[in-house]
Image (tube, rainbow, N blue to C red):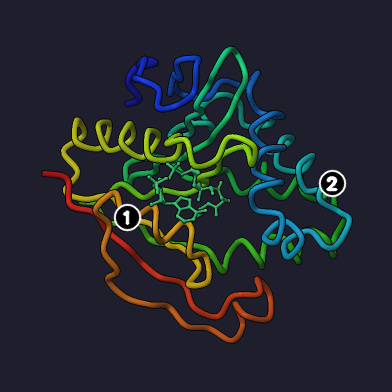
Amino acid sequence: MDTPAERVSATPLDVPIVVRPAHMDDLDTMLQLQAIAFADKFRAAFGRSKTSKGVAALARTHRLQGPSSLAGMHVAESARQIVGTITMRTAEMRIDDGNAVEQAFMQELGTWGTLRALHAFSQLDHRIGRNEAYITDVAVLPELRRRGIAGLMVRYVAGLARQQGKACLSLYVSASNAHAIALYHKLGFRQQRVRRSWWNALLLGERRWVYMTCPLL
Ligand SMILES: CC(C)(COP(=O)(O)OP(=O)(O)OC[C@H]1O[C@@H](n2cnc3c(N)ncnc32)[C@H](O)[C@@H]1OP(=O)(O)O)[C@@H](O)C(=O)NCCC(=O)NCCS
């Protein structure tokens, strides 16, 4: 299970940063931050100028399922402001309740919008192995980038994964995301394989997705 919030030393920011499990109260801010950081993925999943509908659908999905749907989701907070997000999933965690997802998406997006979004998200699916802790949703507020916040969050979840006896961290990153790849390399991740798909290119604007892992010693 998640450890309680941990105060970690901040890098060049004046105010200390805390990485902690996400709460329901954080939901709207987290999703807004991710909608900015992953604007292209949100456009692909929900359609042009439908980002706010997508955010509403995701928020409704979590509210229907309650706090347990936030398992593995963490935020970086500085001076009471959420400045980053990261999710760490393991094979033991329960997956989203499909009924809640469908219900929430149908209410916010309608039939075609739901089909489109669920299909786009299915392209990013990964079957999590027993020995790995799988990272997603690594995002930092644009104005606070290059201050070590993402590194801090990844190191924080690495600590959680170690406590759970996991052998490695893993993630997929789009091959064109040079900034993120530089970040993960610096943290000790190495490329294992590349997933290539024209369907992904069509839907998500990226044909090649790099699977990277980092051993947890
Ligand atoms: C990728 C992202 C999370 C990095 O967050 P960040 O807090 O700025 O990263 P950090 O400050 O911890 O960077 C650590 C290292 O990563 C590398 N790095 C991060 N951003 C970089 C950039 N824009 N250009 C080059 N290297 C970069 C550098 O090696 C950096 O160390 P340095 O600053 O000492 O040179 C942030 O740019 C972001 O939110 N991007 C949009 C969402 C996204 O692409 N997420 C990744 C999905 S897999």
- The location of residue 161, given as percent across then percent down, is 25, 37
Identify whether 17 is placed above or below 54.
Answer: above
Mark 1, other Cα within 10 Å: few <14 / some 14–19 / many ≥20: many
> Which residue is at the front of the view, 2 or 5?
5
The CA distance from mark 2 to mark 1 is: 30 Å
Choose top left, top right, bottom left or bottom right for residue 81.
Answer: top right
> Which residue is at the front of the view, 208 or 12?
12
Mark 2, other Cα within 10 Å: few <14 / some 14–19 / many ≥20: some
> Which residue is at the front of the view, 214 or 94?
214
Instruction: Report the residue at 38% width, 77% height from top.
Output: 194
- Toward the left, the furthest residue is 217
Would residue 90 appear left or right of 41 to someone viewing this image?
Answer: left
Instruction: Report the residue at 47% width, 49% height from top.
Output: 136
Task: State the residue position of label 1.
Answer: 170
- The location of residue 189, given as percent across then percent down, is 27, 57
Instruction: Report the residue at 78% width, 58% height from top.
Output: 46
Identify whether 162 is placed above or below 91.
Answer: above
Would residue 159 appear left or right of 48 to someone viewing this image?
Answer: left
Residue 53: give its label: 2
